[in-house]
Image: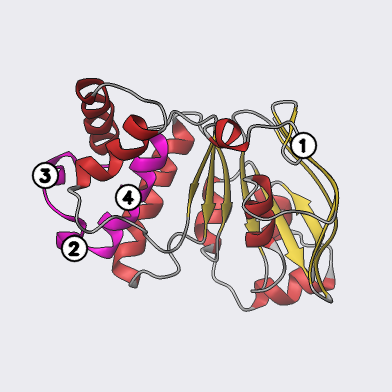
Amino acid sequence: MISIQNVHKSFGQLEVLKGIDLTIERGEVVTMIGPSGSGKSTLLQCINGLETINSGEIHVDGTSVFAPDTDLNKLRQKLGIVFQSYNAFPHMTVQRNVTLALRKVLRLPRAEADEIARRQLDRVGLLAKADVYPGALSGGQQQRLGIARALAMSPNYMLFDEVTSALDPQLVGEVLATMRDLSSEGMTMIAVTHEMKFAREVADRVVFFDKGVIAESGNPEEVFLSPKSPRLKEFLSHSQF
């Protein structure tokens, strides 16, 4: 599981995480919602070790992310992360984008890496695009390439940071469908999202962030139909779910 205990994070004088406590169990799908700038994406990057913390503890399967003796590169193999920007290498085919980490990080033979890549591309509906370059893909397809690339490393957890926010509305659905498929397969997922309908439908638990704190948390029906905090009520009043 992922255990987050009293985590504080500041950028200069700005405190963006103000004592976050959260536990994500294996097989659970947690969606994080809230206004922009409330700390959701920062927490995801702290879980992955991309951002340091000022105080508190984050453990992934019992390993402290920020302990001096922690091998972060090894730990990150458990944590697939997909950002809103696609970050594909434009000079490599779709398949080579997926095999790169398999060959460079895991040192797998080409044939084995190719087999894994094709399996994951098929999983996200991109096998037919294996030999094209990322520039020939739509935005939704490029985002699904990012998901396939993360899945190829066989992570225990998938972290999604507003992966649909840069997409045209007609492309959002295909990415969310891929995430729904992962959820149905039992993948542990933490998804920062502004798609309230998705957050309600796919999550086991919804966590509402506001000004650096978790203002409310619960199952989707509790959060969306019976919000307790005034800030969550106000936030949902401007959303469709």
Residue beneath the point at 67% across and 73% down: 35
**SS label for mark 3:** loop
> Mark 2 or mark 4, which has the lower sequence index?
2
Q: Which residue is mark 3?
A: 131
Residue stretch rendered in magenta on the structure: 124-151
Q: Which residue is mark 2?
A: 135
Residue 130 highlighted magenta (yes or no):
yes
Badge 3 vs badge 1, beta-carbon distance below 8 Å: no
Q: Return the disc, 1 or 2, that comes first in the chain's sequence.
A: 1
Amino acid carrying label 4: it is: Arg
Residue toward you, 32 or 121: 121
- Asked if 54 appears above or below 16 in the picture, the reply is above
Residue 109 picture location, percent across and down: 26, 21
Circle 3 crowding by C-alpha within 10 Å: few under 14, some 14–19, many from 20: few
- Picture coordinates of residue 217, whole percent (x, y): 77, 52
Q: Secondary structure at mark 4?
A: helix
Residue 68 occupies which quadrant of the picture?
top right
Residue with the mark numbered 1: 68
- Residue 37, label in figure: none
Q: Position of residue 182 (x, y in %)?
A: 43, 37
Q: Nearer the viewer, residue 109 or 138?
A: 109
168 is higher (above) or lower (below) than 160: below
Q: Is residue 233 magenta?
A: no
Which residue carries the number 4 mark? Answer: 144
